[in-house]
Image (cartoon, rainbow, N blue to C red):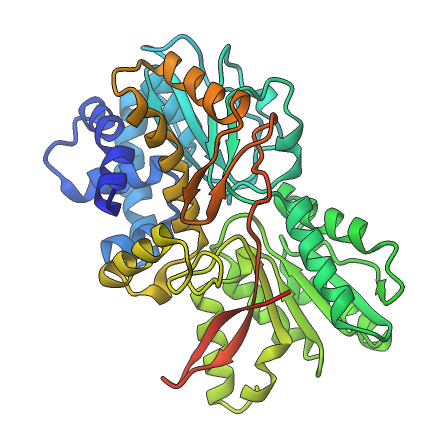
């Protein structure tokens, strides 16, 4: 199965329905922007795909596409409300609507309509029970919030990514084993982000009984103008001689460059910098490259940066040089298409999300939506069956979380090609 097949499966039917309803059969650019937006891509990600700029994408969405949508829907303003757009496009044909709670503006979601049911992925959703639907089907490649593990009706919930409670347990174990002397740990997080708050709370819980890790009061101001809000906090943790600085951005990735600037603002020498998966992106490496080139950072100190992620293409277990043949083939294909350095964990988990559906379709291609998800439940949950994915063995418990899901801890090294790169380390 190639990436083109996956992309086609995700986009063809749903996007064609959107195109027909919006009557945009003449403009290929607008067609791609709307389809990619409805599939959950941010303006920054769309810019990379279309070889444009984030500002140009936002401008076209605001000045050309949104007015057309507002005219079609007969409303004064949508303000990028894709939930409302989906309701308009789909509710007239299907039997229920999506009535979602207000969420931060950085929230995006991915959907795939299948005869009235949804494969839904949102970075910030706190409970599927708040969706006004008689039946909900969720396959999420990127949501890590712990609240999703406690759904009342989770018969058709399947999470590919490792939840925060397990990611932070792995990270806490690494930190405890790394240090023999007492270390003082501070956390920057966004109190208005469910993902960020969940990660912070889980990490603190796993470290609360540690004899070597002392948790300082946390800073919750990552959603505001942090350079002014965190200055008193930085002065405080400096006086406390902080040793470990944990930075947990939102579930979205658009502001990770600003979170990188936080490291400069803190200016704490010899401090271990730990980032969540939403911090481990190319723009962070670019920022490190610039600081090394300008002499502000010593390349010998790059091991002071740690990032915890579900998967990396250099993983010893599931990377390009592993015993996982599917992962090896995926990395080879990704290298030809984009270059391995540009492939992150979201690519792998998205692929695996489609793969678990394909496995059921292979057993019986002539299935309707209802029987498909019934068969998924019987195969993966009742039957406790597993399949091999890019991110390793995929097997689900009764709640829909993976059994023994993967976690990788990355550090940074200076490569022979003259720039920074992520490399996994053994725990």
Residue 360: image x %, image y %? 36, 25
Q: Nearer the viewer, residue 195 or 305?
A: 305
Q: Is residue 126 above or below residue 315?
A: above
Given the current orientation, which residue lies at the most extreme bottom position?
295
Q: Nearer the viewer, residue 267 or 274?
A: 274
Residue 239 sits in quarter: bottom right
Q: Is residue 50 left or right of residue 170?
A: left
Residue 124: image x %, image y %? 56, 38
Q: Is residue 298 left or right of residue 10?
A: right
Quarter of the rendering occupied by the N terminus? top left
Q: Is residue 225 above or below residue 144?
A: below
Q: Is residue 328 visible?
A: yes
Residue 298: image x %, image y %? 57, 89
Q: Is residue 154 left or right of residue 360?
A: right
Residue 366 sits in quarter: top left
Given the current orientation, which residue lies at the most extreme left position?
26
In the image, what residue occupies the spot 36% across and 10% down? Answer: 94
Q: Is residue 298 visible?
A: no
Q: Is residue 255 above or below residue 402?
A: below
Quarter of the rendering occupied by the C terminus? bottom right
Q: Is residue 83 left or right of residue 33?
A: right
In the image, what residue occupies the spot 42% across and 18% down? Answer: 375
Given the current orientation, which residue lies at the most extreme top position?
95
Q: Is residue 351 above or below residue 374?
A: below
In the image, what residue occupies the spot 57% across and 33% down? Answer: 125
Residue 172 sits in quarter: bottom right
Count of numbered circles on the image: 0
Residue 138: image x %, image y %? 48, 27
């Amino acid at each position: 199965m190639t990436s083109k097949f996956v992309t086609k499966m995700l986009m063809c039917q749903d996007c064609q329905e959107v195109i027909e309803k919006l009557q945009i059969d003449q403009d290929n650019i607008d067609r791609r922007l709307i389809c990619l937006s409805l599939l959950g891509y941010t303006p920054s990600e769309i810019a990379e795909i279309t070889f444009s700029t984030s500002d140009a994408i936002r401008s076209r969405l605001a000045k050309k596409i949104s007015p057309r949508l507002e005219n079609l829907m007969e409303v004064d303003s949508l303000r990028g409300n894709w939930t409302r757009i989906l309701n308009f496009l789909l509710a007239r044909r299907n039997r229920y609507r999506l009535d979602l709670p207000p969420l931060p503006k950085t929230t995006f979601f991915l959907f795939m309509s299948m005869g009235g049911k949804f494969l839904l992925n949102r970075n910030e959703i706190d409970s599927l029970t708040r969706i006004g639907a008689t039946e909900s089907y969720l396959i999420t490649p990127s949501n890590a919030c712990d609240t999703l593990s406690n759904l009342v009706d989770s018969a058709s919930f399947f999470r590919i990514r490792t939840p925060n409670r397990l990611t932070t347990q792995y990270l806490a174990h690494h930190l405890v084993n790394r240090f023999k002397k007492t270390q003082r740990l501070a956390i920057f997080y966004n109190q208005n982000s469910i993902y960020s708050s969940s990660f912070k709370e889980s990490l603190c819980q796993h470290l609360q009984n540690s004899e070597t890790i002392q948790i300082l009061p946390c800073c919750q101001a990552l959603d505001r103008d942090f350079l002014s809000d965190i200055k008193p906090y930085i002065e405080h943790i400096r006086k406390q001689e902080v040793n470990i600085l944990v930075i947990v951005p939102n579930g979205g990735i658009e502001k990770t460059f600003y979170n990188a600037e936080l490291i400069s603002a803190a200016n704490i020498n010899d401090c271990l910098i730990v980032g969540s998966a939403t911090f481990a992106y190319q723009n962070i490496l670019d920022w490190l490259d610039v600081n090394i080139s300008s002499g502000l950072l010593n390349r010998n100190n790059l091991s002071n940066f740690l990032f915890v992620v579900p998967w990396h293409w250099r993983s010893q277990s599931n990377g390009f040089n592993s015993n996982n043949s599917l992962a090896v083939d995926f990395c080879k294909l990704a290298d030809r298409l984009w270059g391995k350095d540009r492939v992150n964990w979201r690519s792998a988990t998205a692929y695996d999300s489609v793969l678990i559906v394909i496995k059921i379709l292979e057993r019986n291609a002539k299935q309707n939506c209802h029987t498909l998800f019934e068969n998924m439940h019987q195969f993966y949950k009742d039957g406790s069956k597993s399949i091999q994915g890019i991110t390793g063995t995929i097997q689900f418990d009764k709640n829909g979380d993976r059994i023994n899901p993967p976690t990788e801890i990355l550090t940074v090294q200076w490569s022979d090609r003259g720039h920074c790169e992520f490399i996994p380390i053994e725990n």
